Image: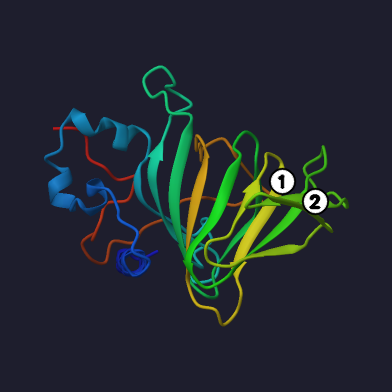
């Protein structure tokens, strides 16, 4: 992705967050210049990859496969003694035409919450022992209600609604056409993008960046060392 595309995506997400009246912590507004002056007091942000993120899953088709996100809080499975949080929280911004590919998590259980905007469609499957799609009904939990749907059903979440995604439950998501962009929340167990994502079709995670302009915000993979 070009840096200009990333900058534009982050600005669009900021605007959606403001529209939904969700308030961000101060570190989300640090400029690249301000990050150069931050000391070890901000190591939790650096080491737990808090902050802005962009994924195109390494495919180079961000407007079709990918989205913008912010990790607001997270523990660290590699340093559990130093960082004792057992939970994480994210915001995800998805535009019409974008989607997240089918995947499950080995260890993480999460709630995906529609925080505002249009409607999101979450397709669900149970996984087989071999990592395929099971042709079995899926038990779904949405906001205190439990119900069963056939394999491959898309569960619609309107603003304010959520779904619990359990370990080994395949899921993808896209937007209901014509309903507009969506701000999603994610509340989960600790997030470990390096080891806990099982994609149905092998893909990447972070984009290759072409530097055609200065960064608007640093991504969570770009923080400089502590001063």
Nearer to me, 102 or 112 = 112
Is 183 displayed left or right of 203 in the figure? Answer: left
Residue occupied by mark 2: 138
Query: In the displayed structure, would residue 63 be above or below residue 122?
Result: below
Q: Position of residue 187 (x, y in %)?
A: 50, 45
35 shown above or below 183: above
Quarter of the picture containing the C terminus is: top left
Image quadrant of residue 153?
A: bottom right
**Residue 200 appears in view:** no
Which is more toward the observer, 195 or 187?
187
Indicate which label's residue lies in the foreground, 1 or 2.
2
Relative to residue 88, is residue 80 depicted above or below?
Answer: above
In the rendered image, residue 102, in percent from the top left (x then y), is placed at: 67, 55
Q: Is residue 207 left or right of residue 65?
A: left
**Residue 206 placement (x, y as % from top left):** 45, 51
Element type at marker 2? strand
Q: Looking at the image, which residue sits at the far bottom?
A: 178
């Amino acid at each position: 992705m070009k840096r200009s595309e990333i900058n534009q995506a982050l600005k669009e997400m900021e605007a959606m967050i403001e529209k939904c009246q969700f308030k961000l912590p101060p570190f989300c507004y640090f400029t690249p210049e301000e990050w150069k002056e931050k000391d070890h007091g901000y190591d939790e942000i650096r080491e737990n990859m808090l902050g802005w993120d962009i994924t195109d899953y390494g495919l180079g088709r961000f407007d079709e496969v990918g989205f913008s996100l912010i990790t607001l809080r997270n523990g660290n499975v590699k340093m559990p003694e130093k960082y004792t949080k057992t939970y994480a929280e994210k915001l995800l911004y998805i535009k019409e035409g974008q989607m997240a590919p089918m995947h499950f998590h080995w260890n993480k259980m999460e709630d995906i919450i529609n925080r505002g905007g249009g409607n999101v469609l979450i397709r669900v499957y149970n996984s087989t022992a071999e990592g395929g799609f099971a042709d079995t009904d899926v038990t779904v939990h949405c906001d205190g209600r439990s119900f069963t749907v056939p394999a491959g059903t898309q569960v619609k979440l309107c603003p304010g609604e959520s779904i619990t995604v359990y370990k080994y439950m395949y899921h993808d998501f896209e937007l209901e056409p014509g309903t507009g962009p969506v701000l999603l929340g994610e509340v989960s167990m600790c997030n470990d993008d390096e080891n806990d994502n099982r994609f149905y079709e092998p893909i990447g995670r972070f984009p290759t960046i072409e530097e055609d302009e200065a960064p608007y915000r640093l991504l969570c993979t770009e923080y400089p060392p502590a001063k």
